[in-house]
Amino acid sequence: MGSWNRVLLGAAVLLAACTTTGRSATPAGAPATTAPASATSGCGSRVETGVLPDWADAGFSGEARIPHVFGLKREILAVLFGHPLALRRGEGPANKILWVAKPAATSSGPAPPATLAITATLDGTDTRVTREVAGGPGPSIMDLPRAGCWHLELHWPGHTDTMDLVYAEG
C-alpha cells in the first residue's frame, strides 16, 4: 500500500471514529476548537480559536486568532469580541459580534444592503427574541435577556444558517 493510500485510510479511520450526530458535529478539517460552548448545557456550537478562514479575515492582520463560532452550514461566522458572552458586564467589552457571511460562489458584484435577521431561542424554554443587523452581516452588539444556551436562526438574502451561543450570568 502506497503512502497516499495509508494517509487516506488513516483519515477515513479517524473520521469514522470521530463521527457524531446532531448539531455538535465539527466538520473534518475544522480549525482548533475550545471545549463545547457549555459542556453541561449540551449547547452544540463550539467556540473556535484557530486561524480565521480566508473568506472571513478581511480587516484582520496576519493569522488572526480570535474566538469565533461557525454556523452549522459554515455559511456564516460569528467573531466574538466580547468572549465569553455575558448578561451583565461591569467593565470591558460589550457582547460585540462581527457577523461574516461566506461569499456566494457566483457573485455578479456587490450585493445590495440587506438585513441579517436573527431569531434566538433559549434552550429548553419558549423564550424567543429577535434581533436585526441593518445592512446584513456585519458588526453588532448582541445582548440577550437571560443566561444559557441560545439557538440562533440566521437569515439574510438568499441564505440561512444556525448556531448556538452561550451567555454566562456575568
Image: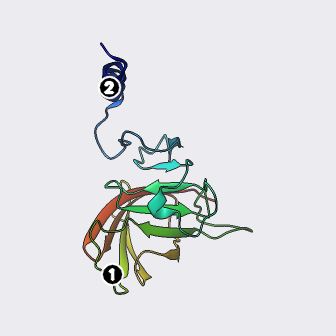
Quadrant (top left/top right/bottom left/bottom right) for the N terminus = top left
Q: Is residue 168 left or right of residue 107?
A: right
Q: Is residue 154 above or below residue 148?
A: below
The structure residue drawn at horizontal position 41% and vertical position 40%, both measured from the top left corner, is 29
Say which of 63 and 100 sits in front: 63
For residue 35, the mark is none
Q: Quote the CA–CA distance across marks 1 and 2.
A: 39 Å
Callout 2 amino acid: Leu
Q: Is residue 3 left or right of residue 48?
A: left
Residue denoted by label 1? 109
Q: Residues within 10 Å of mark 1 (few under 14, many from 20)?
A: few
Say which label, 1 or 2, has the lower sequence index.
Answer: 2
Say which of 32 and 21 sits in front: 32
State the count of labels.
2
Callout 1 amino acid: Gly
Where residue 116 sits: x, y (%)?
37, 77
The structure residue drawn at horizontal position 33% and vertical position 60%, both measured from the top left corner, is 162
Q: Is residue 29 visible?
A: yes
Residue that protrudes farthest toward the front in the picture: 2
Question: Helix, strand, or loop for circle 1?
Answer: loop
